[in-house]
Amino acid sequence: MKKKNRRSCGIGGQAVLEGVMMKNKDRYAVSVRRPDGEIETDTEEFRGVWHDNGLRKLPFVRGVFNFVDSMVLGMRTLNWSVSFYEEEEATDGERQSLFRKIFGERADDVAMGITTAVSVVIAVAVFILLPYFISGFLSSYIRNVSLTVIIEGLIRILIFLLYVVGISAMKDIHRLYQYHGAEHKCINCIERGRPLTVRNVMRSSRLHRRCGTSFLLFVMFVSVILFFFIRVEHPGYRVLLRIALIPVIAGISYEIIRLAGNSDTVLVRILSAPGMWLQKLTTKEPDESMAEVAIASVEAVFDWKAYLKETFDYEVEESPAQTAEDDVRVPEENEGQAGKTAKAQKR
């Protein structure tokens, strides 16, 4: 097997209720372990918001579109997975019928749009505005404006870390984080040149540089830098400025996370380290049944055998699970060595 520089396979995803969503270009698949134990996979096309807009390809602008797309698609796939487990009550059914009478066939899209909008408003209020107002109370004691801005940034990061730690302690979130780990393990398995088998997936790292957790942490750090250098005097304009800079922050953070997924320099490793550490909270080790669900989602939208052939010149047999040699040709990558390029021996 030939060795190539680190290159992202291009797929990404997220954990859903008892399952995993994987997206490759304009297609995505959601695989869920149903209550009867069977795996059900739904594959559809999702071209994103304003998919015909040429701005989607511009660096630092494309990140904004991708961020919105990930939120919309995330809500859609999460709702689909929940539908296998939710218990519909009569009152809920009546409300749903009324909602559908008002909006008709667009009811689901409207409901998803409202949920997404409310989520964005809450996130902006908690992670952007709340730290600003808290630091404002300290301004009467701290005369240095630069120091106040730095304290605001530290409060923002602290609130985010407390949020991550808080939800990580919830028992109901534990299984979701296990599926999150299964998602990362599948992608790491492929990008390290290993055939996508349960055994290989379980041996792969559950941490990945292109994780949404790392992206959000970059958002926190980038906001500190921008708010430090871009200032206005009027308090009302400061609030508006923080809201107006959110797309800029998202665009810069996206480019950083994109670079991290395609590069393995020392600088990239240093920048990625905090996010990788934080992923130890937002991902958990999955069991083999969860790995099976994640594999089903990947295979529904991505030809991993063609990827291994193109990237590593690695020929995969029709039934790699039957060949024990496939499981040992590529050395195991420890979580602390996530940046090392895979090495393997050509057949």
Image (cartoon, helix red, strand yellow):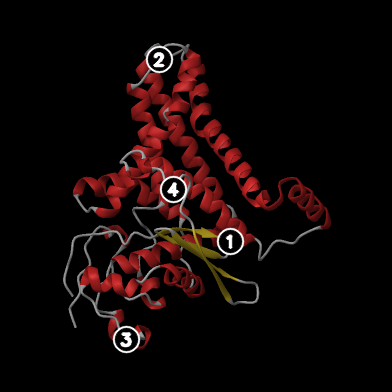
- Picture coordinates of residue 101 (x, y %)? 77, 49
Name the residue that disc number 3 marks. 324
Which residue is nearer to you in this view: 330 or 99?
99
- Residue wearing tag 4: 51
Amino acid at pointer 1: Leu
Characterize the local packing of mark 2: few (<14), some (14-19) or many (20 or more) Cα atoms within 10 angstroms. Answer: few
**3D distance between C-alphas at marks 2 and 4:** 35 Å
2 vs 4, front mark: 4
Mark 4 → mark 3, Cα distance in angstroms:
44 Å
Q: Residue at x 32, y 68 (%)?
A: 190
Tell me residue 47's x, y (percent).
46, 53
From mark 3 to mark 1, how far is it between C-alphas? 32 Å
Q: Is residue 207 left or right of residue 139?
A: left
- Circle 2 residue: 232
Mark toward the start of the polypeptide (4 vs 1): 1
Between marks 4 and 1, how big is the CA–CA gap? 28 Å
Which residue is labeled 1 in the image?
17
User: Residue 104 in the image: x percent, y percent?
Assistant: 71, 50
Q: Earlier in the sequence, mark 2 or mark 4?
A: 4
Q: Residue 135: percent from the left, percent from the top?
A: 48, 21
Q: Secondary structure at mark 3?
A: helix
